[in-house]
């Protein structure tokens, strides 16, 4: 066993005390989950470093080569391995790779020590099968044959094949069911004492046999970083194609939300959007059902779509949508891209079958995967390491990610789908990260918007009127004009240039909303850069001439017209039977139905009625715009803790050092008092400290009842409050004297004691 010299630290906490402030700050940056709230001292820090969840998270971030170096220490027969022996144990890895791995492990406190490396107990427990080897025979309570090489050499090929398979990456295997004939190879090995039963169905290969079968490579083959082939593309071409994809995404999401604004999608009892609503949206947007599901997920991830609330079980645009649609194109795209990156949902699962054989709906809770944000970020990080214009093929990228995070390898199945999603929104093109993608990774939403500003076209405030009653928008429209055209025309096709078609029904829709024929003529003249075709003017005038000849009001309700013949036609028309009309006077019909329902029946029958106010004026009913409260959806926070900034790490290290100093300076018998009862001894010590400028060791209970110990430099004592400089927090603090539980001068060897 390696003996620990007297001058070497004997525990993890003692070793942490020997680390410099910069090294401790680097530890906090590498393992941010242990930094909040700030540990009170080194012992507290060491305790947090041993928390199983924190250890697992730190191990999950290690690459294959680093884990192989850790395996050398974990598999050593003694507690502690000379650092020089680690490189000798892995001849297939370059010395600089081994040295970097040791540095990475000690920085994260997954190993500790300088010349002799030790693994904390919790790390040993977290890595159950180091190097893919099983436990020792003694731990498995298996009596191995005395001459193990001879026993293994005498096995038949089928039995040896079982052992060699278990000597690979995983030493646990499934025990076949007993058959009617000869025993299976696994059962014969079990009877021979070469396998250990761990439960009724599974067996484990003892470590000694695994090492014997591996021969000269006990830790497995070397695992250097793979060097995948690089994909080359022209950066300018990548950005142009990414801008096109970004423009398409922004436009499609805007169209989706406009449709849902008019007719929200229902919320299923199990969550999500019904298939019939997805089909309706796909038809309205002229896209596939799969694309409609993707757009729903993208809008939801960006916080633009949500459930209406407790009393409105339907999917609606959120209040954030009203702000989003007024923003510049680059900002709108950045909102979508950041929402996708942070989302804990996998849109690629929409339409797939769950374990019960039922199809998974869009926006269903079944799509949640909390590891998704970390996987997306690791994908973009791997691509960002390539030079501008360079990237990786999907298979090579997955292989690289498997090497970088082998403990998460089973979670990488969605990577190809994530790459496809990133390409759809313009984050990458053909395996190459776009400028917007780089900005998203390094600067978040703001960085993404800045990178895309010069790549996306500026919104236009005009259209080109065509003789075939279409209006061509040569680019994305400003929000106000887009809203207006969505009322007076129908979208015929979208893309780089959107084509709107003016029809009889769209003109009638505008008139129903309160527009006049003059208003429409002025709109087309003002918005079009080309002369307004005569056919368009004639269409507006013809529809306006018929509009409002019928007037509908509330009786519950009435229909009136100066054209008595028209009223007779309406009354005798079978298509209007659902309106339940009857004649009240020569120019008036009445109904027991509401005005909105009668308007709907008459319009469906081909008439052009207008609503009327009690004063006889045409009543306009602008479309309601219901909104969901909404919130930005990464849905749930990523398992990874928020990164620690350099300033935070520096402040935390100061608190740890101050806490250690307070413990080291803690006197044997401080003056104590009961909280809420100020003693004369406490006031005497505090007054002396202020007079002589001496620091004090202070025990204190805050308003929440939490106790702490700290070193304070008193400044003043008045009105029942002590003003002083808190060494741990490095700031001026105010302490209520009645909450002080103990006090002593730091520099005194034999402080005063007693309750005063």
Image (spheres, helix red, strand yellow):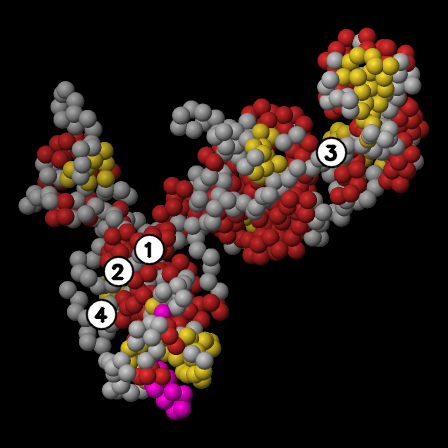
Evaluate whether residue 26 shows in this view: yes
State the residue position of label 4. Answer: 10
Q: Residue at x 75, y 43 (%)?
A: 479
Give the SS element for disc 4: loop
Q: Residue at x 21, y 63 (%)?
A: 80
180 on left or right of 218: left
Residue 40 in the image: x percent, y percent?
A: 35, 69
Tell me the crowding category of disc 1: few under 14, some 14 to 19, or many 20 or more residues within 10 angstroms, Cα based: many
Q: Quadrant of residue 598?
A: top right
From mark 4 to mark 3, how far is it between C-alphas? 75 Å
Magenta part of the chain = 684-701
Dots 4, 3 in contact, CB < 8 A? no
26 on left or right of 297: left
Tell me the crowding category of disc 2: few under 14, some 14 to 19, or many 20 or more residues within 10 angstroms, Cα based: some
State the residue position of label 1. Answer: 55
- Magenta-colored stretch includes residue 390: no
State the residue position of label 2. Answer: 120
- Magenta-colored stretch includes residue 694: yes
From mark 1 to mark 2, how far is it between C-alphas? 10 Å
Dots 1, 3 in contact, CB < 8 A? no
State the residue position of label 3. Answer: 623
Q: Quadrant of residue 567?
A: top right
Q: Tell me which label, 1 or 2, sits earlier in the chain.
A: 1
Give the SS element for disc 2: loop
Dots 1, 2 in contact, CB < 8 A? yes
From mark 1 to mark 3, how far is it between C-alphas? 56 Å
């Amino acid at each position: 066993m390696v003996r620990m010299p007297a001058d070497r630290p004997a525990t993890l906490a003692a070793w942490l005390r020997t680390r410099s402030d910069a090294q401790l700050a680097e530890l906090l940056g590498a393992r941010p989950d242990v930094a909040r709230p700030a540990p009170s001292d080194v012992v507290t820090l060491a305790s947090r470093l041993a928390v199983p969840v924190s250890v697992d998270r730190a191990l999950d971030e290690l690459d294959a080569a680093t884990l192989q170096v850790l395996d050398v220490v974990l598999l050593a027969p003694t507690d502690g391995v000379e650092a020089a022996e680690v490189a000798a144990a892995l001849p297939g890895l370059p010395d600089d790779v081994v040295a970097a791995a040791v540095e990475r492990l000690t920085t994260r406190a997954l190993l500790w020590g300088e010349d002799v490396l030790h693994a904390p107990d919790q790390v040993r427990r977290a890595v159950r099968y180091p190097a893919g080897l099983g436990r020792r025979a003694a731990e498995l309570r298996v009596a191995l044959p005395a001459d193990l090489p001879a026993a293994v050499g005498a096995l038949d090929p089928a039995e040896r094949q079982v052992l060699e398979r278990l000597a690979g990456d995983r030493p646990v295997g499934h025990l076949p069911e007993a058959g009617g004939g000869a025993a299976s190879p696994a059962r014969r090995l079990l009877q021979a004492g070469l396998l250990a039963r761990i439960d009724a169905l599974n067996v484990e290969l003892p470590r000694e046999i695994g090492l014997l079968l591996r021969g000269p490579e006990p830790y497995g083959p070397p695992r250097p970083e793979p060097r995948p082939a690089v994909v080359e593309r022209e950066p300018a071409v990548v950005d142009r194609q990414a801008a096109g994809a970004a423009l398409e995404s922004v436009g499609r999401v805007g169209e989706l939300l406009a449709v849902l604004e008019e007719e929200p999608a229902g919320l299923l009892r199990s969550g999500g959007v019904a298939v019939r609503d997805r089909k309706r949206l796909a038809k309205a947007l002229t896209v596939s059902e799969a694309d409609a599901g993707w757009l729903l997920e993208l809008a939801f991830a960006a916080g633009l779509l949500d459930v209406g609330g407790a009393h409105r079980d339907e999917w609606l645009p959120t209040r954030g949508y009203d702000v989003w649609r007024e923003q510049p194109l680059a900002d709108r795209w950045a909102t979508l891209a950041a929402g996708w990156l942070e989302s804990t949902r996998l849109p690629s699962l929409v339409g797939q079958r769950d374990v019960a054989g039922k199809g998974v709906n869009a926006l269903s809770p079944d799509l949640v995967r909390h590891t998704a944000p970390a996987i997306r970020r690791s994908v973009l990080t791997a691509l960002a390491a390539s030079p501008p214009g360079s990237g990786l093929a999907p298979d090579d990228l997955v292989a690289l990610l498997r090497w970088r995070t082998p403990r998460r390898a089973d979670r990488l199945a969605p990577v190809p789908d994530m790459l496809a999603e990133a390409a759809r929104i313009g984050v990458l093109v053909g395996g190459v990260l776009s400028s917007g993608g780089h900005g998203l990774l390094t600067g978040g939403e703001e960085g993404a918007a800045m990178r895309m500003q010069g790549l996306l076209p500026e919104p236009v405030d005009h259209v080109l009127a065509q003789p075939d009653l279409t209006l061509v928008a040569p680019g994305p429209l400003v929000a106000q004009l887009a809203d207006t055209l969505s009322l007076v025309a129908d979208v015929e096709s979208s893309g780089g240039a959107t084509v709107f078609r003016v029809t009889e029904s769209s003109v009638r829709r505008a008139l129903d909303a309160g527009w006049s024929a003059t208003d429409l003529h002025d709109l087309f003249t003002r918005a079009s850069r080309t002369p307004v075709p005569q056919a368009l003017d004639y269409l507006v005038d013809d529809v306006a001439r018929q509009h409002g000849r019928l007037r509908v009001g509330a009786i519950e309700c009435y229909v009136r017209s100066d054209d008595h013949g028209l009223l007779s036609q309406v009354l005798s028309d079978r298509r209007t039977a659902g309106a339940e009309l009857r004649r009240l006077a020569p120019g008036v019909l009445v109904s027991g139905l509401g005005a909105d329902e009668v308007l709907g029946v008459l319009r469906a029958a081909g008439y052009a009625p207008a609503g009327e106010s009690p004063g006889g004026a045409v009543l306009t009913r602008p479309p309601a715009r219901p909104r969901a409260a909404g919130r930005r959806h990464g849905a749930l926070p990523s398992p990874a803790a928020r990164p620690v900034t350099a300033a935070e790490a520096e402040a935390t290290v100061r608190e740890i050092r101050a806490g250690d100093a307070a413990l080291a300076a803690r006197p044997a018998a401080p003056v104590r008092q009961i909280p809420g009862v100020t003693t004369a001894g406490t006031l005497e010590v505090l007054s002396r400290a202020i007079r002589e400028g001496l620091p004090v060791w202070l025990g204190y209970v805050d308003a929440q009842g939490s106790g702490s110990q700290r070193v304070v430099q008193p400044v003043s004592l008045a009105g029942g409050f002590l003003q002083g400089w808190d060494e741990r927090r490095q700031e001026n603090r105010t302490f209520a004297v009645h909450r002080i539980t103990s006090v002593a001068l730091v520099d005194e060897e034999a402080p005063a004691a007693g309750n005063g």
